[in-house]
Image (tube, rainbow, N blue to C red):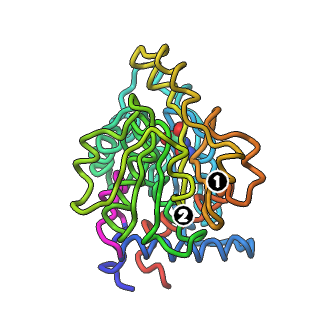
Amino acid sequence: MPSAENPYYKKSLISVDDIKERQMLELLLEEAKKMGIHRQAKEALEYLKGHGVSLLFYQPSTRTNSSFHQAAQFLGASVYNPGSMQYSSVSKGENLPDTIRSIANTTDASLIVLRHPDDNSSRTADKFAKMVKPEPVPIINAGSGTLEHPTQALLDLMTIYSKMQTIDELKIALVGDLLYGRTVKSLAMLMARLTTGNEFAFVSPDQQKFPQEYLDKLPEGTSYTETEDLDSILDWADVVYMTRTQKEWFEAHGQMDEYEKLASAMQMTTERADEMHDGSIVMHPLPRQTELRYGVDSDPKAAYFEQMRFGLWTRMALMKLMLVEDPSA
Ligand code: NCD
């Protein structure tokens, strides 16, 4: 496949809007499927041999960090991952552009994966990484602020595709903190634009509603409802995507009283999972608090542990597509 047909090659992934077309999405899902087959056979791959992948995480992470790290290693890359930027020169006041240029140079990175609390962090990083010599370094946004988490949306879609055999004509309920949660925004925007016939329910307390500017951005004709009543969507939904109340953002906005009131407002319990129809699934990006009860874990509808494995495969697929011009070779 010539590079013109690999739209990921040497391009940054800052937003789900960078996944321009359905075909581009399908290329990634198919590649992720292949990565799953490689992993099941425990094959050592060399697609990224000689490449450096550097992980810069300014916010806590378990799944995103570990899966990117392993994904790069399983593809044969060498990985720089300090785990947290807490001990870097960031504590001496170094700014993001200097850190990006330093890491690009000292680690000879072919790719930088960035998680950061600022909404514009990945875009800023990308601007400076584009100036790195001898070659620009693409950035992958591994979660920025409250607005974007594009690789989570991709792995969520991979999960839906694998579990439901389709990403179209489904009923999707997005539940919990739709105000501060970034995963739900990225997933809803990606699905609404590149899938067909899906219906969405935005389920949250009034204070955590999916922001109006995001509702306004949904493509015309997108079918959705908003409700505060979790019980009302249980037997309707094919996918119930739970999210936690984002404590850190309530803290940052001085809203801890609100947080205490909202933290346990929406809960997936074993009784509620029983109300869901056969073949439906419960997803959650994790970490969880009280919104996803541990009893649900043994229900066959619980898809959130597999979701993590799909995350590994999806991130392998993404990095391969970004660094290998002809992915079919
Ligand atoms: C999410 C995140 O960082 O936005 N975590 C993840 O990447 N799996 C969800 C969250 O923190 O609630």
Q: Residues within 10 Å of mark 2 (few under 14, many from 20)?
A: many
Q: Position of residue 43 (x, y in %)?
A: 71, 74
Residue 275 marker = 1
Front one among 234 and 35:
234
Main secondary structure of the magenta stretch: loop
Residue that badge 2 annotates: 314
- Please say whether residue 294 is visible from this viewpoint: yes
Residue type at mark 1? Glu
Position of 213 relative to 206 (above/below): below
Q: Position of residue 22 (x, y in %)?
A: 34, 73
Mark 2 vs mark 1, CA separation in Å: 31 Å
Magenta segment boundaries in residue numbering: 10-22
Front one among 96 and 212:
212
Q: Give the residue drawn at x 31%, y 63%.
A: 193
Q: Give the residue drawn at x 31%, y 38%.
A: 211
Q: Is residue 189 magenta?
A: no
Q: Give the residue drawn at x 37%, y 56%.
A: 13
